[in-house]
Every structure is written in structure tokens, then in C-alpha cells.
Amino acid sequence: MQAARGCKCFSRTTSYKKLRPNFASRDLLPLIAANPDIMEQWILYSADKRASSGWYLLEDGRIGQVEPETAPIRFASLEEGVAEYVVRELDFWSSSD
């Protein structure tokens, strides 16, 4: 649950909630393209969560939720899946404050 705790702490110690209405997951794509190692870091974060809440990210870029259970969502690319995962995961943790 360490990774999940980090995300919750991030949402509390940043201006994420204030900034969130100003961007979409697609806005992260240039950042991911410029720093492709970010994808591996988020995949490892998801694998290390050990929590049933929030979202998960699979190595092929599909995302989903354990509780409530959702069918995995596919994206055209790993980059798009990671971008969507990042936003949904941070949205989840910032809404649980």
C-alpha cells in the first residue's frame, strides 16, 4: 500500500485539485514521449500498489479498477494508456481526501 499512500500524499501536498480542470490525459502525451521511462515507472507503481482501490495499469497499457470491478479499457498505444491511468489514479486519490 506504500505506492497508494504516496499518491494520496501527492494529492494533499500539491495544487493538483486546483490545476486538474485545466488539463486532460492527452496533455501528458508530449511529456511521456519526451521521457519514455515514465511509462515503466507508472507500470511499476501500479504493480506495487497492493490496494484494491484506485486504478491499475497493465504492461500493455490497459487500465481498469478492481473495486468497483471494471472491464479493462484498451487504448491505441501504451503512451495513451499510461496518460489516462495517471490522470484517473490521481483523480481517484485526490477525491478521497
Image: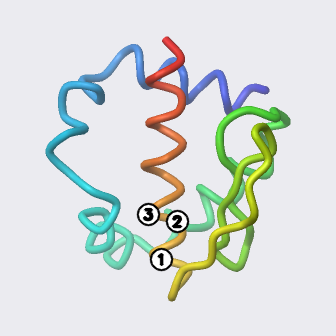
* Residue 36: x %, y % from top left: 46, 75
* Residue 6: x %, y % from top left: 59, 26
Which label sits on residue 79?
A: 1
Give above or below for 75 relative to 52: below
Separation (CA) of disc 2 from disc 1: 5 Å
Mark 2 secondary-structure assignment: helix
Which label sits on residue 82?
A: 2
Mark 3 secondary-structure assignment: helix
Which label sits on residue 61?
A: none
The answer to whether the residue labelled 2 contacts the one labelled 1, judged by CB atoms less than 8 Å apart, is yes
* Residue 89: x %, y % from top left: 54, 42
Q: Mark 2 packing: few (<14 Cα in 10 Å), some, or many (20+)?
A: many
| Kind of residue at badge 2 | Val
Separation (CA) of disc 3 from disc 1: 6 Å
Residue at left 35%, top 78%?
Answer: 33
| Kind of residue at badge 3 | Ala
The residue identified by callout 3 is 83
Q: Mark 1 packing: few (<14 Cα in 10 Å), some, or many (20+)?
A: many
> Which quadrant would the N terminus be assigned to in this image?
top right
Left or right: residue 41 compared with residue 24: right
The answer to whether the residue labelled 3 contacts the one labelled 1, judged by CB atoms less than 8 Å apart, is yes
Give above or below for 67 relative to 11: below
Left or right: residue 5 compared with residue 81: right
